[in-house]
Amino acid sequence: MDLDLEQFGDIPPVTREAWDAAVAKALGTSTLDRLRAVTADGIAVPPLTAPRSDRDPLPARGPGNPWSIVQRVRFGDPAATNARILDELAGGADAIDLVLPSPPDHVVVFDDADEGRGKLIRAFASVYLDMVTVHLTGGAGVVGAAEALLSIADGTSPGRSTVKLRLGHDPIADQSLKLSVTDAEAVVAAHLARLASLAPRCNPEGSLLAASGQPWHALGASEAQQVALALASALTFVRLADAADLPDLGPERLAGALEFRLVADQNQFLTIAKLRAFRRLWALVTDELGLPARPAFVHAEPAWRTMTRRDPWVNILRSTVACFAAAVGGADAVTTVPHTDLIGMPDDAARRLSRNVQAVLMDESNLHMVADPAAGAGAIEALTDSLAERAWDEFRAIEAEGGLLASLAAGAVTGRIAAVDKARRTEVARRRLPITGTSTYPLLAERTPEVLDGPPAPAPVAGARRLAEPWEALRDRSDRALAEAGVRPRVFLANLGPVAAFTARTTFAKNLFEAGGVEAVAGAGGDDVVALAAAFRASGAALACLCSDDRTYEAFAAPAAEALKAAGARVLLAGRPKEAEAALRAAGVDDFVFDGMDALALLEGLHTLLETPAA
């Protein structure tokens, strides 16, 4: 379609005053403060911000340069692994992230050079290694796998390999969380020494070491903490390499061989701002160290912490938003994972959906055609500035504590992460931070998608828990009750008055109870409390929740509660009738169900009361 842009040339610019007037008219008696969100770092997200004409695009991929589509493949049976690798590459991926078995299994795979080399030869059969990038993930075993891959390539291309390897091991995040400073330094130094022997054979366009944000994110780190930890990890690597005086892995070579694996989640604007803030701060760090200025290689990974087992199709939406944000934020490589990754081994259809998220955003939406498209956007620039400031403060705090290894040994930075995580989990329990399909809008009769034989994706680090896990545990108890007794735990929604009076709170109550696996059975409504008690007895439920508006409660809630109590119910009431609470409790109401309460604690208590089978 031809569009004559000149026809828009006479449109006068819109002033800030005009925007303010339009907003005031839309909000009426309210104010913009009601729309102001606050992040986990305490950053107030401005609801209305003027464009920034003084900002230039940040150096990253550059216009027209596509990001690398990285697809994760778990290493297992060589033939099955090979089939998945070939399928991913044929479907549009240009890089493979080979996830090695966790310790101690990776020792079995790669402790013998011939065995490891043979398995990798079969896994990469018919793969043109000089045309794709191979990322390796899975602890210290990545070095053995890299050596085996290089030996394969050396057979056809002696000398420096044409294989572009990116080793995704972060010895600090993976191994040094609970070590003393001396022991942690020894672990990192030993790993660097091994990398130094590998470096001369590696393609300089690849990477030898990762500063990984996934373990910290999984433990609960905020956006600013993730950026600060990436900077602190990289600085630790550079310092230890310099102290070791490694001939082939000095500070300049190491800084250029780092891969920064940062997490992209469904918070679109924060993810964009986080990646942009990181690039700005890494440029500052390298300048302070006197290292050559070169853009960091940023690999955006999916947020394990926010993925769910329940209603896993929502994971596709989460991945789409995260991938969009990573691309706009300037990531050099992006990984998306199948929506069934937490259920078992994803099948071909799930892997294709995951891969196509990136293909559509790149080839149809052309997100890569503009360099730093968020540059100049007032809200994004403000978030980038604030995140950079908070991350720099955290980075300086870590340095003041003696560096990252000392801060970890003292529990300082992990204590701050734990505090952020606790606050976030409180918001999840109160449904102030909703999890679609899990803590809100659940579907008890959902169909579990098919997966292949194999375990689900493991946690990125020991001790990490996804945000959805407590809610999923309640749904698991409900499923076990259904399997053992043929019926789920139930609550009777004791609707009072006409439909218009009870619909809002009935919908709210059904949503809340079923998020915890308690099946809601709705009554017909009306004001006949005798009929209401009879309907409760017929429902087979042990719980009853009164649902209506405040006016109807004034007339009928107390006698309805008395009738339900006499019928043997534990009585709840949807809403929070402040002044009437004492009278309603006296009439038989045991608990009140309202927006912002600790819904998780309520539901856990109900499962205990109903004696549903725990794990």
Image (cartoon, helix red, strand yellow):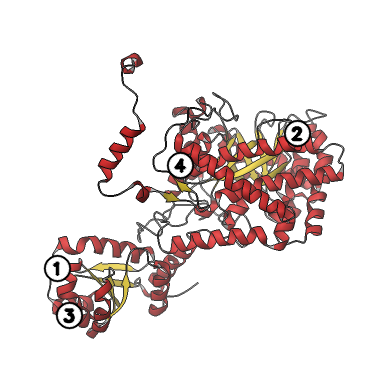
Disc 2: CA contacts within 10 A as few (<14), some (14-19) or many (>=20):
some
Amino acid carrying mark 3 in the image: Pro
Give the percent coordinates (x, y) of residue 499.
15, 62
- Corner quadrant of residue 18: top left
**Element at label 3:** helix
Badge 4 vs badge 2, beta-carbon distance below 8 Å: no
Q: Nearer the viewer, residue 127 or 464?
A: 464
Question: Depth-wise, is mark 2 or mark 1 nearer the camera?
Answer: 2
Q: Looking at the image, is 40 positioned above or below residue 121?
A: below
Q: Residue at x 76, y 38 (%)?
A: 254
The residue that mark 4 highlights is 321
Disc 4: CA contacts within 10 A as few (<14), some (14-19) or many (>=20):
many
Q: Residue at x 42, y 34 (%)?
A: 50
Q: Residue at x 54, y 32 (%)?
A: 92
Give the percent coordinates (x, y) of residue 90.
56, 32
Disc 2 to disc 1, how far (Cα)? Answer: 73 Å
Amino acid carrying mark 1 in the image: Gly
Disc 3 to disc 1, how far (Cα)? Answer: 13 Å
Q: Looking at the image, is 43 positioned above or below residue 298?
A: below
Amino acid carrying mark 2 in the image: Leu
Disc 3 to disc 2, how far (Cα)? Answer: 77 Å
The residue that mark 2 highlights is 291
Looking at the image, can residue 349 be seen?
Answer: no
Badge 3 vs badge 2, beta-carbon distance below 8 Å: no
Q: In the rendered structure, which disc, 4 or 2, sits on the residue that comes first in sequence?
A: 2
The residue that mark 1 highlights is 497
Badge 4 vs badge 1, beta-carbon distance below 8 Å: no
Q: In the rendered structure, which disc, 2 or 1, sits on the residue that comes first in sequence?
A: 2
Q: What is the tally of numbered marks visible in this picture? A: 4
**Element at label 2:** loop
